Amino acid sequence: MIADDKKTPKEKRPDLLSQFKVFLKERFSLDEDKDDEVEVIQSISRGIEFRGINLWTLIFAIFIASIGLNINSPAVITGAFLISPLMGPIMGIGMGVGINDLAMIQRALKNLGIAVFISLLTSTVYFVLSPLHLAQSELLARTSPTVWDALVAFFGGLAGIVAGSRREKVTNVIPGVAIATALMPPLCTAGYGIATGNLYYFAGAFYLFLINGICISLATFLIVRFLRYHQKEYPSPATERRVRQTIWLAVLIVIIPSTYLGYQIVRKTIFEQSAKRFVANECDFQYRQVIKYDAHFNRKQSRIELTLVGEPLPADSINLLTAKLPMYGLTDAELVVRQGTFKDAPVDVDAIANTVTEQVFRYNQASIAIKDQTIDSLRRYIELNQTSHLPVADLRNELKTLMPDVQTFTAARSLVLNSNSAKPDTVTLVYAKFSRSHTAAERRRIESWLRTRTKSKRIKLLIE
């Protein structure tokens, strides 16, 4: 009987596996604190409509975001994220698809179209009237969408719908999703493209908005299906098939181009980093200086341009540099060296002058710093002696009251230079001659009085 009660390792494994499954289910379950299905659907449905306060809030947020892009202010743009109500109809589309509510899908698409039109119109009017027309870095960042923008929008949408389906709302999630997914700035950038007639800016920014919107809707759809919300019946199988085909088409429109653009950005970044290492390691010449280099990435053939000053670099040295390109992963890159009179290419004289000045300053920075420190210390010393002469006669009379046997006395502030430091130190030197010798206690008493009277931290007392 005792032997029968013992469990073999094979009998224990199923228990451990089942316990692990229970542990994972408890940890990652979304059933805890889940809000009523009807309440969640009604809450998202209410956020779909763009009328009254929602519409005015959208217009104000568009103006704020446009100003932020125009003056290149991340803080202002972030404020527009938090104000924008654009998340409502986008999540409404995902919810409608998730529960097969064709009326909700149509209403969300209609209101999203109104919101997009108002946003483009408002931002276009602003950028037409604005005196600032230069595209700043914050604006340019919204013109080249990649697969990473799709991933951010997708995971942001997951966080948003999960937080929205809770009974106790997580107040910091929705603002965070609004900031991360960035729905407002792409529309403002598209308006800038319309105002300036730049089709590339408009297309890139509007595509980024589509990426964010579709990925948020897709995330909402997946969570709604995961939570097993009650699904309505479509009017006909043909309608259901058409909705599913539209969903897959939208996903493919987002994923394929953005993945390609993301791949090209990765290639460009790797090329630029390799070019930087190549220039730093291989282009340190003795009688010539690299004053500028440019790394131009191209899908077919990239190019590294070096601009040199000093003695011309021989052809065999250029060939040797070209032969070293494969060592840095630059096999297909072309090396172009510009030197001499630069007859074949325009030269930025200001850039050359600035670069040479920077090099000279860097090479002499240490010695200049030491000299400036020494000059500053000497200037302080001169000013101190000009404005703070020690009252030697008064000090002698006061000391005579303390020590009547004093015969000779003088005091002066002096600089003491340490061999280990370039910064001199100020010391008050005091010389006194007495008619008798003094004890150590009397000497300490004199030094203490001198520190208080002269307000000097360092006293050097010489007694004869």
Image (cartoon, rainbow, N blue to C red):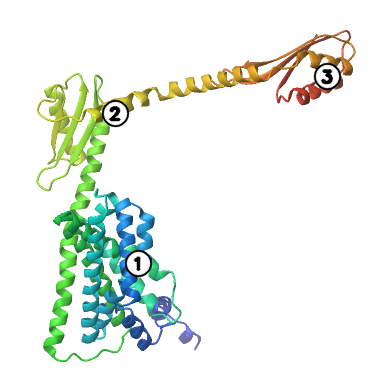
Q: Is residue 147 left or right of residue 8?
A: left
Local SS, label 3: helix
Q: Gap between marks 2 and 3, in whole Å?
A: 61 Å
Q: From this viewpoint, is residue 146 visible?
A: no
62 or 265: nearer the viewer: 62
Relative vertical location of residue 436 with respect to residue 282 in this rendering, above or below:
above
Q: Which residue is mark 1?
A: 178
Q: Which residue is mark 3?
A: 443
Q: Earlier in the sequence, mark 2 or mark 3?
A: 2
What residue lies at 46% left-to-right and 24% top-to-bottom? 369
Q: Quadrant of the C terminus?
A: top right
Q: Position of residue 94 (x, y in %)?
A: 26, 78
Q: Position of residue 182 (x, y in %)?
A: 30, 63
Relative vertical location of residue 123 with respect to residue 331 in this rendering, above or below:
below
What residue lies at 64% left-to-right and 17% top-to-bottom? 385
Q: Which quadrant of the view contains residue 378?
A: top right
Q: Gap between marks 1 and 2, in whole Å?
A: 42 Å
Q: Which mark is residue 98?
A: none
Q: Earlier in the sequence, mark 1 or mark 2?
A: 1
435 or 210: nearer the viewer: 210
Q: Which quadrant of the view contains residue 189?
A: bottom left
Q: From this viewpoint, is residue 201 visible?
A: yes
170 or 201: nearer the viewer: 201
Badge 1 amino acid: Ala
Q: Which residue is mark 2?
A: 354
Local SS, label 2: helix
Badge 3 amino acid: Arg
Local SS, label 1: helix
